[in-house]
Image (cartoon, coloured by chain):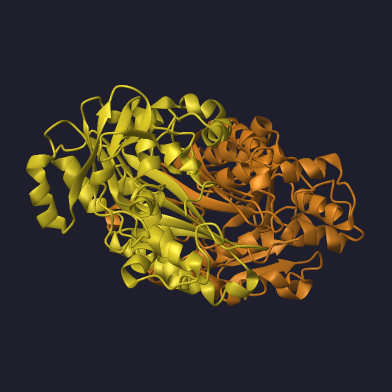
Chain colours: A yellow, B orange
Amino acid sequence: LKWLETVKMTNIRLGPGAEFDLIRQFLGDAGHGPDGDPSAVQVGPGDDCAVVSGDLAISVDMTVEGVHFLREWLRPDEIGYRAVAAALSDLAAMAATPIGILVGLALRLEDAHEFGPRIMAGARAAAASANAVLLGGDSARSPGPMVIDVVVVGNAVRPLLRSGARPGDTLWVTGELGAAAAAVRSWKRGDEPEPAARLAFARPTPRIEEANWLAEHGAIGALLDISDGLAGDAGHIAAASDVRIVLDADSIPIHPVVHASSADEALRLALAGGEDYELCFAARPGAVEPLAAQFSEAFGLQLTCVGAVQAGLGVVLRDGNGRIHDLPDTGFDHFGGASG
Amino acid sequence: LKWLETVKMTNIRLGPGAEFDLIRQFLGDAGHGPDGDPSAVQVGPGDDCAVVSGDLAISVDMTVEGVHFLREWLRPDEIGYRAVAAALSDLAAMAATPIGILVGLALRLEDAHEFGPRIMAGARAAAASANAVLLGGDSARSPGPMVIDVVVVGNAVRPLLRSGARPGDTLWVTGELGAAAAAVRSWKRGDEPEPAARLAFARPTPRIEEANWLAEHGAIGALLDISDGLAGDAGHIAAASDVRIVLDADSIPIHPVVHASSADEALRLALAGGEDYELCFAARPGAVEPLAAQFSEAFGLQLTCVGAVQAGLGVVLRDGNGRIHDLPDTGFDHFGGASG
């Protein structure tokens, strides 16, 4: 379910493990901070977006046929919508406001005239839903899978980073997790997903207004969006903030469409399934509780406290009996590295 | 030689023809101008870069294995260098100053650890040579060809567009054309290219300082970089500026490494080969001549007047006898559309 091979190389303080070693190699010296004009770069590699020129947030998000989706799963407009919505979620993850997108699109020659315009129609629809415009792009022939690369550009007047969590904070998520992963599970079994699960995968909602609201209300210490699965993304906060995160198994808000054969499997989809595009944030003790009802009323979306931030490193799971589990032991082996 | 399937979808005033029809479909309403917050978007689709937030130029450039290069042709670091240099050339094409790059990299699993870091080392070297930093990126597994998508970000205080040419202007290019195309021709014949041709393909030089110098000296009316071949890119200026461009066959500066079997073939490589990454610009009559010697001295690069701008549409070629040729008739069929 989780695509091990897809990792944002945007974390200066990366966790241990082979995946992160590779990204460190990709970054080279860039991982240690910008070496050009430092005044132009406010946030370099190490977060959901880079921030340059004062307040401009930029991110790039790659979607590859056969890796992130199969073409049998989605209509072309949904492929475009999903790729852009997922990319816009990186702006939400910084509490940035979208300006526009650019799209790089590699297509087989025979797909150019049929699929191409429909993919781009979906891409434009996702952009429009977030008040972003199509600024430009590049198209190329692909001799293999289609590849959609979406660049998002937004204003981040007060960018919220992954590195702001402190011991004593609480950890929160918006909405419910696991529905997109449930859709993928159905497709992989040869079944058609339930409509709610399919929708969660095909038309994710970047939580842009929600992030800005939470930022304006001072609720957020560290922020990202859940693209790799809560366990993995909590690991990004833990690594960037140099803290330990304890997730409460019984608190994880599992989407009702996640009908699993066991509670363990449901939890696994919610923790490691990925592609949720909900927000995950750390907050100072007591900062969120007074706001939760107002937030839910404004956005029709629940806020759930899913864990605690402690001194230490990595991410662990506390079960209903208070027992602590290393996440690799619970089957999230793609995540073995970052949980330490 | 020319990759028909690769077209920047950045031209609001696109020429006629099937390729541009497709791009118009991709752009949808976006081709008619931004529909979001117009104050945030200074230049939308229609040029080498978009410009947002006052003076930030952004472009995306896709390089696909098997389409833009074969892996047998280049070392991994050269693949990364070339992809980034080509993308940075889009900043030169706006007379913008680079800030940074983001890289989307899709690789076969077996290439991740061997090729990936070497590609990124080349990418970082190309960025550093232009004082740009690696701001971030995304990596994904590819089940097929490797795909490198480079996002460039720069400052464009006075962006120079494709749309500024006027009848009466002269048309100029920097440097010499056709060397990269000659390298591709050699590879396709099964030969090793001559070193100068290979270098032109593997390590192109984005003409960033040159473009800024020309802009500061007020020499430029309309500007772009030559990625599709002079004939095609002159067509972009013609379409964007609503003018006709007459190229002088005898004036085209053909790179000395282009040893062709005939003068016609040499001219064809220089006009249609592509991947030159030299600048092409229109200038007011008499504006460039007084600067040419100073430019050559400063940059070790010649400036050549290659044609004239007239009222009308499209691009034509004037031979040594004064005969006018439609470019489609001279064999540039990939360009049949835009030359009218």
Residue at position x 7%, y 41% in the image: A290
Q: Nearer the viewer, residue B43 or A53?
A: A53
Q: Position of residue A4 (x, y in %)?
A: 52, 46
| Quadrant the C terminus of chain B occupies | bottom right
Q: Position of residue B326 (x, y in %)?
A: 71, 74
Q: Nearer the viewer, residue B174 or A303?
A: A303
Q: How many marks?
A: 0
Please identify the residue farthest to the right as the structure is shown. B261
Q: Is residue A313 above or below residue B173?
A: above
Q: Position of residue B47 (x, y in %)?
A: 49, 57
Quadrant housing residue A305: top left
| Quadrant the N terminus of chain B occupies | bottom right
Q: Position of residue A112 (x, y in %)?
A: 58, 72
Q: Nearer the viewer, residue B275 or A13?
A: A13
The answer to whether residue A125 is visible is: no
Q: Is residue B182 left or right of residue A340?
A: right
The answer to whether residue A317 is visible is: yes
Residue at position x 40%, y 69% in the image: A122
Residue at position x 55%, y 62% in the image: A65
Q: Nearer the viewer, residue B234 or A202?
A: A202
Please identify the residue farthest to the top as the structure is shown. A311
